Image: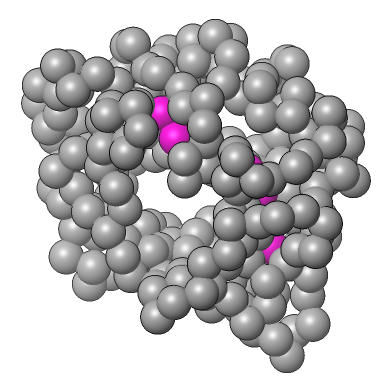
Amino acid sequence: MRLHHDPTALREQYVSADPFPHIVLDGLFDDAELDAVLREFPSPDAMKWARFDNPLEKKLGFFYATSTISDTVRRFLDAMNSFEMLLFLEALTGIEGLIPDPYFGGGGLHQIEPGGFLKIHADFNVHPKLKLDRRLNMLIYMNRDWREEYGGHLELWDGEMRECRKRVLPVFNRTVVFFDERSLVSRASASADVARGRDAQVGVALLLHEWAAGRGAVGAARHDFRYAGFRAVT
């Protein structure tokens, strides 16, 4: 896998981003590589998804014990957890000792079908199986020909959830990386407009962690910003 950005040159942009450390990268991966994953991205009926349907969320997620994926998709997920990706993210963020999640708990393949949603919520801060602190989120969008009028933006909000500071359209081969401090509550809301008749919004999420003992080294002293969150609108 070849990554098409220099992470060291982008670190200052990431660290100083408003309303909290993040960066949006277009063309990080080869288009052909993502197209190969997209061609074999499982439809809602093609495998046993983890289905979330409650007042806070209605969406499909990946679950390692039941989700069956092709070799092409599996190789891509394996590459997301590789040392090459870890070194890239460490150089980008300045956070050393990032640990990937082989179970893709909360990560892996995602899709929101028309009519789905993800409302304001609190994400887990400690991995339930590995007992590691969640530290970094990486979203890779795979939506071909997605136009502005379709919606589906990732919205980055200030700490008080009073103002949206940035909106990110979920277009093909766009990657978003953002910091996840243990003291923050990640917030998200989403809705899908059935009237638009669009296919489900699809992508891959990667969650990175660190040992609890390293909490003090990566907190607000390094990234001086207040409580913040995000929400995604589909």
Quarter of the C terminus within the rendering:
bottom right
Residue that protrudes farthest toward the bottom in the picture: 195
Per the rendered image, the range of residues in magenta is 201-208
Residue depicted at 33% across the width and 11% down the height: 97
Quick check: is 202 in the magenta stretch?
Answer: yes
Residue in the foreground of this view, choosing between 153 and 117:
117
Quarter of the N terminus within the rendering:
top right
Tell me if residue 206 can be seen. no
Residue in the foreground of this view, choosing between 52 and 107:
52
Q: Where does the image place residue 209, in percent across and percent down from the top left?
A: 35, 26
Residue depicted at 52% across the width and 36% down the height: 104
Residue in the foreground of this view, choosing between 48 and 21:
48
Q: Is residue 37 left or right of residue 5?
A: right
Q: Where does the image place residue 63, in percent across and percent down from the top left?
A: 58, 45
- Quarter holding residue 32: top right
Query: Looking at the picture, does residue 32 appear above or below residue 184?
Result: above
- Quarter holding residue 195: bottom right
Query: Looking at the picture, does residue 199 appear above or below residue 227?
Result: below
Quick check: is 59 in the magenta stretch?
Answer: no
Q: Where does the image place residue 34, in percent across and percent down from the top left?
A: 80, 36
Q: How is the image coloured?
A: one colour
Query: Looking at the picture, does residue 10 appear above or below residue 23?
Result: above
Residue depicted at 54% across the width and 9% down the height: 83
Q: Is residue 213 left or right of residue 26?
A: left
Query: What number of labels is visible?
Result: 0
Tell me if residue 68 can be seen. yes
- Prevailing secondary structure of the magenta residues: strand
Q: Where does the image place residue 114, in percent across and percent down from the top left?
A: 68, 78
Residue depicted at 74% across the width and 29% down the height: 74
- Quarter holding residue 194: bottom right
